[in-house]
Structure formats: C-alpha cells, structure tokens
Amino acid sequence: MLALMMTVERIVAERKRALPDKECEALLERIGRGEREAFDAFYRATDRMLYAYALSLTRSHHDAQDVMMETYLKIRAAAHLYRPMGKPLAWVFTIERNLVRSHQRSLGKELPFADISEAELAFDPSNQTEEAIVLRAALRCLSEDERQIVILHAVSGMKHRELSELLDMPLSTILSKYARALAKLKTYLTTQEVRSNG
C-alpha cells in the first residue's frame, strides 16, 4: 500500500508540471505560427500525459510511443486549425485516439495488446522500482475502460465530465466505472498486502 501511495504522489507531482488550459491554448496558437520554442514547451508539458493515454489505448509500450510521436506531428501540422474552446487537452487526446483507431482500421483488426507489465504506467518504461511494479500489477486487474479512466484522471488531471466527452460515455458511466476501478484496486492491494504480511 505504501508503494502505491508513493506512486500516486509521483503522479500528482507530474500533473503539477502540466500547463493550465489558457497557457496550453496560447502555446497551440504559437505552434500554429511555427514557433519552435512553443512546440518544445508544449511537448515538455504534455509528453507523459500523451504517452499514458496512448498506452491506455494500445497497452503496448512500442505502439504507445509511435502513436504519441504521430500525435505530435499532427499537432504541429494542425495547430493553426485549433480554435480555443477552453479544453486544449481534449482536442489533443481526440487526435491521439483517432490515430489509434485509424491504425487499427488499417490493420483490419485490433492492435496486438502487449502485457501491461511491459510498459511503465508511471511514465518511465525502464523503471522497475517496487512502486512501478505494484502500479502495473494493480492496473492489470482493471478492464480497458476502467484503466483508461483511472490513468487519464490520475495522469492528466482531467475531470470526469471531460473524460465523458473524450471517451464518448455518459458522465454516470464514467463515475461508476471510476468507482468500480478504485474498489477493484483497493481489493487487489489489500489482498497483496495480506499475502506479503502473511
């Protein structure tokens, strides 16, 4: 349980480096004008969130990295088309989700899902610390929808209402899946704690 708490603290610290919506929109406007520094700042502020979302969709470290890079290429090419709506990350995540769907269609099947333990859900694929391993194992007990909701809420700090729009699910469904996911995680971690102490 201590390992999970440490991981959550790390995730919260990562969220704090994310830009507020207004600053994010200002960067997108500057990217649209071709400013390299704005793109670099945007990348630094969003790379871990985009990786986490791509990973939640593909469950493959390699595919998540590919999708994330394609997303940045699309952002750079289409930033001039972005119109401020107060939700720049929803726009970005929609681009990423559409790229995953497009890739799935081009394959004529779903992307091959790798074991979730292959990738570091707490942002660093090479991280094999105890808390990273516990987080990966805990998230393995969740369904795909539950995992996406938990990762996006924890990593990007998106509100449940924003997740409802992004994932195209009713708010009540998002809330119930989130509550169910937390209950599953709590049960899993309690069981693991009992096993390690027993």
Image (tube, rainbow, N blue to C red):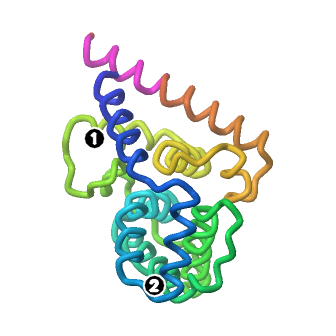
Q: Nearer the viewer, residue 21 or 90?
A: 21
**Mark 2 sits on what residue?**
73
The answer to whether residue 20 is magenta is no
Q: Foreground mark, 1 or 2?
A: 2
* Magenta-highlighted residues: 187-197
* Residue 127 at x, y percent in the picture: 21, 50
Q: Residue at x 59, y 74 (%)?
A: 95
Q: Are marks 1 and 2 in contact (CB under 8 Å)?
A: no
**Outermost residue, top direction?**
198
Mark 1 vs 2, N-terminal side = 2
**Callout 2, which amino acid?**
Leu
Q: Amino acid at mark 1?
A: Ile
What kind of element bears circle 2? helix
121 displayed left or right of 168:
left
Of residues 77 and 25, the one nearer the viewer is 25
Secondary structure, mark 1, is helix
Question: For this rendering, which residue is in front, 134 or 77?
Answer: 77
User: In the figure, residue 72 lies in which quadrant?
Assistant: bottom left
Name the residue at 55% across, 74% down. 100
Give the distance between the C-alpha atoms of the residues marked 1 and 2, in whole angstroms.
31 Å
Crowd band around label 2 with a 10 angstrom C-alpha radius: few (<14), some (14–19), many (20+): few
* Horizontal relation, residue 13 to residue 89: left or right: left
User: Which residue matches tag 1?
Assistant: 133
Report the predominant secondary structure element of the magenta stretch: helix
Residue 154, x across and y down, in percent: 49, 42
Question: Residue 125 occupies which quadrant of the picture?
Answer: bottom left
Q: Is residue 63 above or below residue 135?
A: below
Residue at screen point 75% across, 42% down: 173
